[in-house]
Image: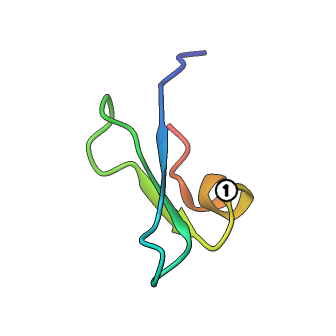
Amino acid sequence: MKQFTAFVHEGEPDEGGYWATCLEVPGANGQGESVKSVWKTCPKR
């Protein structure tokens, strides 16, 4: 199974939430109100 690195970023203080990017897989991004919800929205590759 291939593994990739994803970076989770905290949203702006007035916006809240989190978002993630995976540089090895273009378009594999996720967002949500919690870190756990970010992983649920990230595409599985």
Quadrant placement of the N terminus: top right
Q: Residue at x 53, y 16 (%)?
A: 2
Instruction: Identify the residue at image location x=54%, y=19%.
Output: 3
- Disc 1 crowd, CA 10 A, few/some/many (<14, 14-19, 20+): some
Residue sticking out furthest to the right: 36
Q: Quadrant of residue 37?
A: bottom right
Q: Which image quadrant is residue 41 in? A: bottom right
In depth, the one of 21 and 28 nearer the eye is 21
Of residues 11 and 27, the one nearer the viewer is 11
Q: Is residue 18 above or below residue 5?
A: below
Q: Is residue 24 left or right of residue 43?
A: left
Q: Position of residue 40 (x, y in %)?
A: 67, 58
Residue at 30% of width from left, 34% of height from top?
A: 23
Q: Which residue is mark 1?
A: 35
Q: Position of residue 36 (x, y in %)?
A: 73, 56
Tag 1 secondary structure: helix
Position above or below: 3 against 39:
above
- Counting every numbered tag in the picture gives 1
What x and y, as percent, mark residue 22? 39, 38
What's the colour scheme?
rainbow
Q: Residue furthest front?
A: 13
Identify residue type, mark 1.
Val
Kindly give the residue lying farthest to the top in the view shown.
1
For this view, does 14 lie left or right of residue 33? left
Up/down of 14 relative to 33, above or below: below
Residue located 53% across and 76% down the image: 16
Q: Position of residue 25 (x, y in %)?
A: 33, 36
